Image: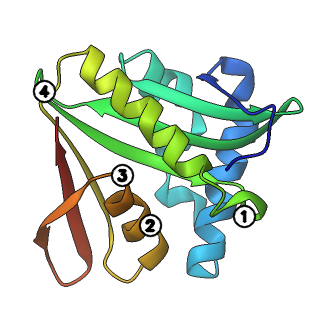
Amino acid sequence: MTAPGVTIRPFRSADQDAVRRLILTGLAERWGRMDETKNPDLRDMQQTYVAAGHAVLVAEADERIIGTGTLVFETASRGRIVRMSVDAGLRRTGLGRRLMAALLDGARERGLREVVVETTHDWHSAVALYESCGFAEYNRDPDDVHLRLRL
């Protein structure tokens, strides 16, 4: 269970720096380093995602951003989850599943029929999270695993 007082809400422009830092910190923890130039979408998430009509959610506790996730509307029937990240100290508390549930609720509200997500096949905690939310593998290449959930 996540700690009490966690609110999941839509991204606001004022969240930009905290969300960017959370995502980049998580990627650096995973890969041991981070090349920020490989993540240009994080420079302005309002413009990249929100203004384009996609759904960016944040989890907040005590006025601190502790998690985030984005649902990109690829077509009228298919969405893609990107930029999922949870503060290291709060992983395995159910916060990632709460964020995913909120994103999937948004997908259903938009009438999507499937949602996909991609990660590296050896990022076991990410794969486990997605599978625990009902996603199933539908494609694997040498580096990545692609999972989908039919709604």
Residue type marked 4: Thr
The Cα atoms of the two marked residues, 1 and 4, are separated by 33 Å
Where is mark 3, residue-wise?
133
Q: Element type at marker 3?
A: loop
- How has the structure been colored for display? rainbow
In contact (CB < 8 Å): disc 3 and disc 4? no
- Asked if residue 45 is positioned above or below residue 39 in the image, the reply reads above
Where is mark 1, residue-wise?
88
Q: Position of residue 95 (x, y in %)?
A: 61, 48
**Earlier sequence position, callout 3 versus callout 4:** 4
Q: Position of residue 26 (x, y in %)?
A: 63, 63
The Cα atoms of the two marked residues, 2 and 1, are separated by 13 Å
Q: Name the image quarter holding the C terminus.
A: top left
Where is mark 2, residue-wise?
126
Residue type marked 3: Cys
Identify the residue at the far right of this view: 62
- Asked if residue 121 is positioned above or below residue 104 in the image, the reply reads below
**Earlier sequence position, callout 2 versus callout 4:** 4
The Cα atoms of the two marked residues, 3 and 1, are separated by 20 Å
Q: Element type at marker 2?
A: helix
- Asked if residue 105 is positioned above or below residue 101 in the image, the reply reads above
Is residue 105 rendered to the left or right of residue 113? right
Residue type marked 2: Ala
The Cα atoms of the two marked residues, 2 and 3, are separated by 11 Å
The Cα atoms of the two marked residues, 2 and 4, are separated by 24 Å
**Earlier sequence position, callout 3 versus callout 1:** 1
Q: How many marks?
A: 4
